[in-house]
Image (cartoon, rainbow, N blue to C red):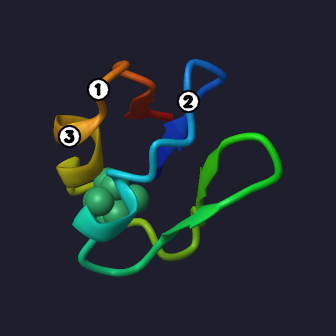
Amino acid sequence: MAHVINDECISCGSCEMECPVEAISEGDDKYMIDPDLCTDCGACADVCAVDAIHPE
Ligand code: SF4
């Protein structure tokens, strides 16, 4: 299981620095979460201003 960033993402970047395992990076049109690194902690979802991050 991993968290996923959906198309609501506005690429603000606020989630990237919250991830303790550096699983979040900027993609072409939104931020992405590497499912192999994500531990499902939920820290990123808590800071997303547009509620774009959810458990898969
Ligand atoms: Fe990182 Fe936690 Fe978000 Fe997974 S759920 S991407 S480990 S902050």
Mark 2 to mark 3: distance in Å?
13 Å
Which residue is tagged 2? 10
Q: In the image, ligand 1 is in what quadrant?
A: bottom left
Q: Do the residues labelled 1 and 2 touch (CB within 8 Å)?
A: yes
* Residue at figure coordinates x 66%, y 22% from the top left: 7
Sequence-earlier tag: 2 or 3: 2
Q: Are marks 1 and 3 in contact (CB under 8 Å)?
A: yes
In the image, what residue type sits under mark 2? Ile
> Residue lying furthest right in this view?
28
In the rendered structure, the answer to whether residue 42 lies left or right of residue 6 reads left
Point out which mark residue 49 bears.
Answer: 1
Q: What element carries label 3?
A: helix
Mark 1 to mark 2: distance in Å?
9 Å
Where residue 13 appears, as percent x and y from the top left, is 44, 53
Q: Is mark 1 on a helix, strand or loop?
A: loop
Which residue is tagged 3? 47
Q: Nearer the viewer, residue 20 or 3?
A: 20
